[in-house]
Amino acid sequence: MFPWVYGFTWSTGNLIFLGIFFTVVIVIGLTLGLSVLRSLRSAQSNEIAHIRWKSEFHDLPAAARTCRHIFAGDTRERTCAHDFDCGTCTAHRHIEELRRSGRIVLHRPAGSGGFSVSSERLYHRGHTWLRREPDGTVVVGLDDLASRLVTDRSTLGLPPVHAAVFRNAPLVTIRRASAGTRILAPIDGEIVEVGGEGCEWLVRLRPRSLGTDAFAHLLRPAEAAGWLQYEFERLQRSLASGGVGVTMADGGLPMQELASAVPVDAWDRALGEVFLEP
Amino acid sequence: MDSSLIPRGLQRTSFPRFLAWVLPWVALLGVGLFAVYLCLAYGLNQTNMDNRFAFGAWIYLDLTVIALGAGAFFTGFLLYILRRKELAAVINSAVVIGFICYSGAVAVLMVDVGQPLRAWFTFWHPNVHSMLTEVTFCITCYLTVLAIEYVPLILKNRKLRKNASMLLFEFQLHKLMVVFAGIGTFLSFFHQGSLGGLYGVLVGRPFAFRPAFGIWPSTFFLFILSAAAAGPSFILLTSWLVSKIARKPLVAPDVYRTLGRISGSILLVYVLLKAVDTLVWINRTAPGLGFQASSFYRYGDFGSWILFAEIVLLGLLPALMLLSSRVAQHTGWLVTAAAMACSGIVLNRFVMTIQTLALPTLPFDAFLSYVPSWQEVATFLAVIAYGVLVYSFSFRYLNLFPQERELRSA
């Protein structure tokens, strides 16, 4: 049984002690081997984008993972545990059911904190918007908060035409000085056109699916209004050194050139906060 | 300079200041490594240990850091097995501390055995009747488990996670962490116990000898309990200390309170059992071996005050403090209680290692005194320097405290 152990005898002490020891060693080895095997399988089945997002989502601060139903006023406190994949969330399905039956009404909040929200667009939590076009394609652009942070279009690295993009995987890269991040794709699809200078959108996509489930995770305008306001506050809190402290409301609106107000050494942090990159 | 390696959203001191912090520890480590070289090149005559005082500063250090490092297995057990989610705030730090403690202990053991190249003999020629064999097997396995638990933390470094294969491996490894937490708990339970059992079976040392339950003396169970009590307290203490040095909150106060409550509850049970064990030893075990228990406290500075300090001052008192809701409201008092609890366990390991060997057992024996040589002290300090360095680099480049970002902007 244990021929490699010097002086082994078939005694109870030997059997129990060495049996337990080698079982532990085998379990450690098997578990480690299983991790390696699963990693190789994930790499072959092209799950990298999905796993990268799951890993990044796990590391986001709780404030960045706030449930969409808080912005719609459906609930007071809730943190998303479904990687912003509302299609897999039972609570979301239940609330949507109530909404369809008219027991909950989706109210548009009084304001959006000075950020513009279009009724024709759906919003992704990575600060892109999406508009469905009559030809079956969708156009994707930066929402109002992101646009005020990323004002220089030349800093954006756009994907080539025909490139496949995956939901919550990098769509666009931002390079500014030493800081850099990526902007997440709102849905799965293929790039059919890249927007030029002055265009309101960044890319045109042909979605992999046009079913309701493919867009279920995107925020509707009524939710996006409260969400943008919340996100702006979150950005301000993260940039305030040592906490915000006591503040007084001044009734002001966010400036158009938000980027110029972000200190150089905080730029990296600001990009990470807004574009959900831990 | 190294900002691209620092986790996003975390503020760390400038690189020159970090270097200034690290250099003295590197120097201390260098001196220690020279002492290690002397011990390995010229033998254990470089130490002040001898055939009668075979366990010295190094074994004391091993027992102490292994007890304090128990926070890693216990926090992992509570988080992954018992699902105490709030402890996710300290699990990364606990794993690093556990890894430092165990790797430091194993490194010192390699010097202590004198022939580190023959360390594998213990696996090839195991004495299945020896507690030390069990300790060696368990510690080796558990150090492997801790290294495996440490790997995902490193792979989550901002730079490394950009590499797809590292990210995938980290992700898959993290999903199986519950298995490693379970194995870690199992291994820790036995080696912590066997370290205590090692002394309890010394029938020729009536100061340490204890009656057995089955094959295990009472010290087996007391060591498990004391390590489980000290572990969370040490995590509390180190988290607070790092928070003070870094000058930023790292852990929410309720996490400190949870750690304090867990540590206090186990410490109270430990103190009660330790008191019962001591009473049984005073009234039955020691007289049964022909000794009055009081006779052991007449030598040198090892008076009965040690017993009082160990059980009451650094046992019962911190246990009650950690369980008091009034104390829990003040982090300062909570930290004081945790420091007292850790000191109590450190004192216990000192008593078991040093006092046990110093006391005479035969009529012609004398009280032995032992002062470690500078090589022993330097090796001892090198382990501390190594721990500070590993923790400092981990704190700078890894996200050890997941709540740090949120507490910063709160």
Image (cartoon, grey):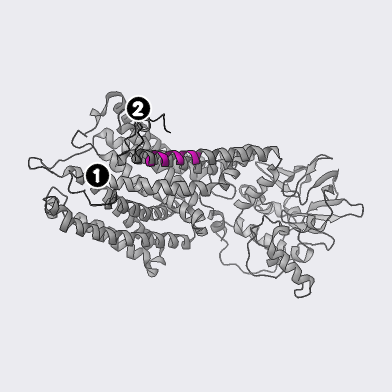
Q: Residues under labels 2 and 1: Cα distance?
A: 25 Å
In the image, what residue type sits under mark 2? Arg
Determine if the magenta segment contains residue B158: no
Residue A38 as seen in the image, left or right of residue B355: right
Q: Chain of mark 1?
A: B
Q: Closer to the camera, B333 or A148?
A: B333
Q: Quadrant of the N terminus of chain B?
A: top right
Q: Quadrant of the C terminus of chain B?
A: bottom right
How many tags in the picture? 2
Q: Residue at x 52, y 58 (%)?
A: B85
> Which SS class for mark 1?
helix
Disc 1 crowd, CA 10 A, few/some/many (<14, 14-19, 20+):
many
Q: Which residues are magenta?
A: A16-28
Residue B128 as seen in the image, left or right of residue B389: left
Q: Residue at x 32, y 30 (%)?
A: B36
Q: Closer to the camera, B274 or B336?
A: B274
Q: Which mark is residue B353?
A: 1
Where's residue B190, x and y in %? 37, 47
Res B385 visible: no
Q: Quadrant of residue B406?
A: bottom right
Residue B176 vertical placement versus B25 (above, below): below
Res A31 visible: yes
Q: Which mark is residue B118?
A: 2
Residue lying furthest right: A135
Where's residue A44, x and y in %? 69, 37
